[in-house]
Image (cartoon, rainbow, N blue to C red):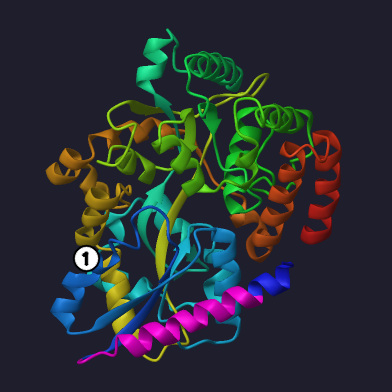
Amino acid sequence: MNHMTKAAALRSSALATIAVLAAGAASAQGVEITYVSGAVGNAVNNFDALVAPWEERTGNDVVLVPMPASTTDQFGQYRLWLAAGNADIDVYQTDVIWAPQLAEHFVDLMPAATEAGVLEQHFPAIIESQTVDGKLVAMPIFTDAPALYYRTDLLEKHGAEVPTTWAELQETAQRIQDAERAEGNAEMWGFVFQGNAYEGLTCDALEWVKSFGGGQIVEPDGTISVNNPQAAAALEAAAGWVGTISPEGVLAYQEEESRGVWQTGNAVFMRNWPYAYLLGNGADSAVAGKFDVAPLPMGEGEGATSAATLGGWNVAVSRYGDNQEVAIDLAMYVASAEAQKQRAINEGNLPTIQSLYEDADVLAANPYMARWQEVFLNAVPRPSAPTQQDYNEVSTLFFTAVHSVISGEAEAAEALEELEADLEDVLE
């Protein structure tokens, strides 16, 4: 299916979903607010419980319209709806990188947040990331940075240490994978990550490139930096994982496919976001109690470092909806300490409200959250700020080039040279 056909099909499916949900959930009282969100982990399953206190207090109803897990597909659908001034969606759950691109379509939440006195509760950098020309485009609801998940039992069994470089990871993963397969576990793989051609690959590959000292694709001052030997070395290293320590199918994996392999006990290492920790210790998990997390490995050479892509999700109110005041009230609730605490306990999402990191209930449910402090020290933003409205095209060009390298279709140096020329055309 080509891109336009896929986009049209997605829009048709999503609009049909809205119609069905609206018809089947007519509000008996108050106002019905339509909330659109992606589906990763338990977020959709837990949504009714999340908004129930607000519904009870206000007498209004919330209808969830779930989107595909792919953030690339979500963003494409959001742009179609917003460009058309679609009034059917009141509230959008948005990625941390989307604020500069979608600002014109959303209500300014600064007055509501200021009146409620909640701005200072959140990490200042996250509020800043959602502020465009003085307008608070969205309120943060949780933050994110990925880590290296590792099987504590397998590392202990095979006398291995937690790797601190990608070379060490490859050697350790291969050794344990081979040993486990020799013992009869033919399904064991050394490392799973997100290799599909979508926004998630931009996150993974940014970490590889940055960890090798290869920069941030486009630097904060707007300089295109991606075409360099360190970046090429990073992508060649990643290409070497596919078919050796990672299955060929990793080229189609997103977060949930990676987690599926990991959680069934068939991977030694995994790169994923915090939500996978709570699920990995669930009753249905084969790895419960058998894993831990560490910062992602460093690359090789000068400038090598550990790097973790800064993620996170926010909630924005459409300018085109008919119930903006009610939608703003819902957005403020979803971003509140009450809702963030519920998300932290039930979904393992990292709060953006600083006081929750000292909340006894949150820490009792998620003692591992303290482990992410070191991960956040190595957080690196995607280049949405310097590329503004062009970020989606920049990211698409980047993950497409990366996918061509890790799938063996292109050499890294050639792919990055062509990518640089393409980025110059977009950003000139």
Identify the residue position indicated by label 1 in the image.
49
Q: Position of residue 327 (x, y in %)?
A: 33, 80
Vertical placement of residue 318 versus 288, above or below: below
The one nearer the camera, 96 or 84, is 84
Image quadrant of residue 30?
A: bottom left
Magenta residues, as a range? 8-29
The quarter of the image holding the C terminus is: bottom right
Residue 257 in sight = yes
The one nearer the camera, 123 or 269, is 269
The reply, left or right, for residue 424 in relation to residue 27 is: right
What residue is shown at x 81% (from left), y 47% (from top)? 420
Instruction: Determine if the magenta segment contains residue 28.
Output: yes
What residue is shown at x 70% (from left), y 74% (from top)? 5
Instruction: Determine if the magenta segment contains residue 239.
Output: no
Image quadrant of residue 318?
A: bottom left
Q: Position of residue 366 (x, y in %)?
A: 23, 40
What residue is shown at x 23% (from left), y 61% (from top)? 339
The reply, left or right, for residue 221 in relation to residue 155 is: right
What residue is shown at x 44% (from left), y 87% (from top)? 19
The one nearer the camera, 259 or 389, is 259
Crowding at label 1, few (<14), some or many (≥20) Cα neighbours within 10 Å? few
What secondary structure prevails in the magenta region?
helix
Q: Amino acid at mark 1?
A: Ala
The one nearer the camera, 50 or 180, is 180
Residue 222 in sight = no
The quarter of the image holding the N terminus is: bottom right
Vertical placement of residue 120 versus 83, above or below: above
Vertical placement of residue 401 versus 228, above or below: below
Q: Position of residue 259 (x, y in %)?
A: 45, 42
Q: Secondary structure at mark 1?
A: helix
